[in-house]
Image: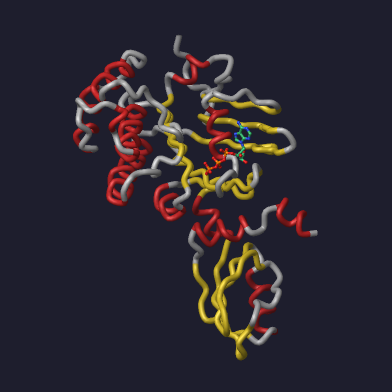
């Protein structure tokens, strides 16, 4: 039975914690993903992205906290939640002995809304040989087949774990981006994880950064950009290291010229830089990569370890 959507949020995660021994892979995660969003999940290796996605898919049961997908618990009610999701797993696991056509037919049987014309179009676009066995496909070809299988039933929610991994630049830049944008334009929702910050910057309209199992930033992309600043400074004398400036989250450079990323304390930082003998050469909107580096290098636990 299909129950109508009862929430503006397709995904709701509240206080989700997952421990492996003493290590918290996820530590008190709170997240809401609105319908129609393109939601980028970023974080360094081991940050907890896949662990979070596995909870969304009901593949892991929360130790603490809760997960709701279309208002349902994906562990208790997998049919209600999962039939509406297209999922590309990080390991691209699929039966190796099937051919591309066989796997498409097999997957189709699970999804009443499977769109065969669209599936065939995607197969052509991805130049996948219908007779090829999965075991003989390259890593990139498996990524394309995985994407096809996730998309062809036109899911309301697309969850892609590192979709770019294994894809070459042209496919990433043109096809994947176009797919994600089309899904969003149709009012459907996309959540994807990625290491490629320029790609997330270009495609996502919400971004959540995870660092060591904790959310260090979660907002719309526009808000993230508005809340941060990048300034370029030139010092009268060459500096071996950047003088400490209030509000500076991240700095890079050498000699006389340095760049600093800050959030919220721009005027204070500029005054302090000028007092330290620096001239302000430029003020820029930071890239997502700047913002990521600022937060990754300010991880709460990393700071504690240094204390
Ligand atoms: P990557 O970008 O490298 O794929 P990720 O952000 O997806 O990383 P996760 O795979 O979610 O990270 O892992 C988060 C942390 O949890 C890592 O430290 C990882 O080693 C640990 N972890 C994940 N699964 C297990 C497991 N089954 N047993 C023990 N530790 C695990």
Q: Which residue occupies the foreground of this view, 108 or 106?
A: 106
Q: Which residue occupies the foreground of this view, 266 or 129?
A: 129
Q: How is the image coloured?
A: secondary structure
* Image location (x, y in percent) of residue 178: 30, 43
Compared with 2, 96 (above or below) is below
- In the shown orientation, is residue 108 left or right of residue 206? left
- Residue at image position (36%, 22%) is 95
Compared with 114, 1 (above or below) is above
* Quadrant placement of the N terminus: top left
* Quadrant placement of the C terminus: bottom right
* Image location (x, y in percent) of residue 98: 29, 21
Q: Which residue occupies the foreground of this view, 19 or 228?
A: 19
- Whether residue 171 can be seen here: yes
- Whether residue 15 can be seen here: no
- Residue at image position (30%, 26%) is 152
Ligand 1 picture quarter: top right
- Residue at image position (33%, 44%) is 167
* Image location (x, y in percent) of residue 123: 23, 32
């Amino acid at each position: 039975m299909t129950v109508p959507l009862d929430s503006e949020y397709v995904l709701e995660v509240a206080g989700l914690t997952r421990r492996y021994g003493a290590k918290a892979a996820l530590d008190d995660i709170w997240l809401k993903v609105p319908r129609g969003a393109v939601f980028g999940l970023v974080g360094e290796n081991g940050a907890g992205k896949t662990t979070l996605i596995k909870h969304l898919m009901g593949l892991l049961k929360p130790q603490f906290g809760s997960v709701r997908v279309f208002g349902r618990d994906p562990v208790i009610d997998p049919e209600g939640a999962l039939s509406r999701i297209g999922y590309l797993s990080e390991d691209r696991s699929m039966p190796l002995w099937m051919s591309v056509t066989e796997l498409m037919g097999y997957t189709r049987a699970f999804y009443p809304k499977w769109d065969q014309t669209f599936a065939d179009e995607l197969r052509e676009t991805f130049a996948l040989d219908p007779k090829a066995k999965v075991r003989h496909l390259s890593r990139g070809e498996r990524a394309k087949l995985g994407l096809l299988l996730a998309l062809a039933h036109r899911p309301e929610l697309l969850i892609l774990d590192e979709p770019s991994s294994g894809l070459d630049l042209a496919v990433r830049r043109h096809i994947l981006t176009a797919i994600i944008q089309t899904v969003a334009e149709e009012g459907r929702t996309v959540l994807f994880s990625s290491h490629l910050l320029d790609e997330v910057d270009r495609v996502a309209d919400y971004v959540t950064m995870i660092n060591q199992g904790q959310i260090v930033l979660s907002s719309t992309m526009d808000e993230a950009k508005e809340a941060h600043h990048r300034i370029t400074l030139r010092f009268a004398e060459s500096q071996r290291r950047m003088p400490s400036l209030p509000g500076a989250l991240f700095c890079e450079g050498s000699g006389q010229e340095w760049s600093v990323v800050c959030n919220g304390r721009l005027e204070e930082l500029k005054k302090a830089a000028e007092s330290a003998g620096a001239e302000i050469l430029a003020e820029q909107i930071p890239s997502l990569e700047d913002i990521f580096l600022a937060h990754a290098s300010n991880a709460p636990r990393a700071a504690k370890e240094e204390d």
